[in-house]
Amino acid sequence: MSNLDRQAVPSVCGGRGFVVAEPVRELLAPRHVRLGESTEVRRLLPNLGRRMVGAWAFVDHYGPDDIADEPGMQVPPHPHMGLQTVSWLHEGEVLHRDSLGSLQTIRPRELGLMTSGRAISHSEESPKSHARLLHGAQLWVALPDAHRHVEPHFQHHTDLPVVTAPGLTATLILGGLDGAVSPGTAYTPIVGADLALTAGADVRLPLEADFEYAVLAMSGQAEVDGVPVLPGSMLYLGCGRRELPVRADSDAGLMLLGGEPFEEELLMWWNFIGRSQEEIEAARKDWTEGSRFGEVHGYDGGRLSAPELPPVPLKPRGRVR
């Protein structure tokens, strides 16, 4: 998934200064962003007061959208570096193409995991013949310095482990939960889990006290630690928890996101995560003029052009609110 903002602003993220070291209940409202002709997303990260949750650096929630008579998702070829993209669907299909030659249709509760490493480009689109509804989330995971220049690769996992309790089915997307571990490659201590709750469910999820957590509401009516979370909102929970009470008044879908707080300070601009303004400038030049990001073949249309960088350089330093 691309950040299509044509006035993309560099965002300082990471670093312990952003982390709340105790349990909190911070409800984050989304920013609405258009993607192409017929898809609008609710952007939860980066947020005005919350840049990351563990290594999770970018979260978009979209749908459910009726695209029966629409083209659906149409995101032209665009570049990434220094991150992983996670595609997660509740309804519909998304066709992934990338500069490695990958061509894969991603369906509900299947993991599409692209590790950009030093450089990759990809496109995402609804197939020409597609289901009526499209509903899902697109997320980015920041790569730590030791792994941010790895060779790019794409993984598709259809058989993911689950954790069950009365009224709950939790599917592991990344990392581990209650002894279950996702087959997706992770480069930091992390967890991403899809929580399917039935009406009347009242459960307590086991957590890691050293992780920070957030819960993204996908559908239905649920309460997380006593706080109602509406679809398209996200509740930041801080650190220091060993369990999380969750209950549902109706069938509901949530995503649990968490991980060890990300110590490194990062600079995120457009579709790049780097460590300096110079890195970001070089990546933009490579996408505009060079061949570092490769070519995506088979997409019916041109690729995205990079927006202009703001005139004032921005460097990671200290806490930004």
Image (cartoon, rainbow, N blue to C red):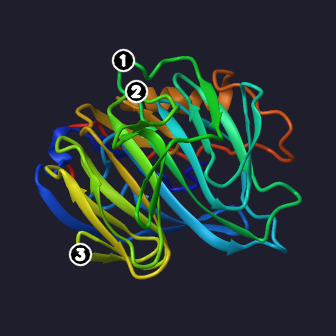
Residue, far bottom: 249
For marks 1 and 3, the one nearer the N-term is: 1
The secondary structure type at the circle numbered 1 is loop
- Of 59 and 6, which appears nearest the observer? 59
Quadrant of image for the C terminus: bottom left
The residue nearer to you, when weighing 33 against 61, is: 61
Residue at horizontal 84%, vertical 47%?
301
Q: Position of residue 312 (x, y in %)?
A: 35, 44
Element at label 3? loop
Label drawn at residue 146: 1
Side (left or right) of 26 relative to 1 = left
Whether 91 is drawn above or below 140: the answer is: below
- Residue furthest to the front: 166
Mark 3 or 2, nearer chain start: 2
Q: Nearer the viewer, mark 1 or mark 3?
A: 3
Disc nearest the viewer among 3 and 2: 3
How far apart marks 1 and 2 lie (CA) works out to 9 Å
| Disc 3 packing (10 Å; few <14; some 14–19; many ≥20) | few
> Does the residue at mark 1 contact the one at mark 2 (Cβ under 8 Å)?
yes
Q: Residue furthest left?
A: 22
Res 318 visible: no
The residue identified by callout 3 is 226
Residue that badge 2 annotates: 187
Q: For residue 29, what is the image quadrant?
A: bottom left
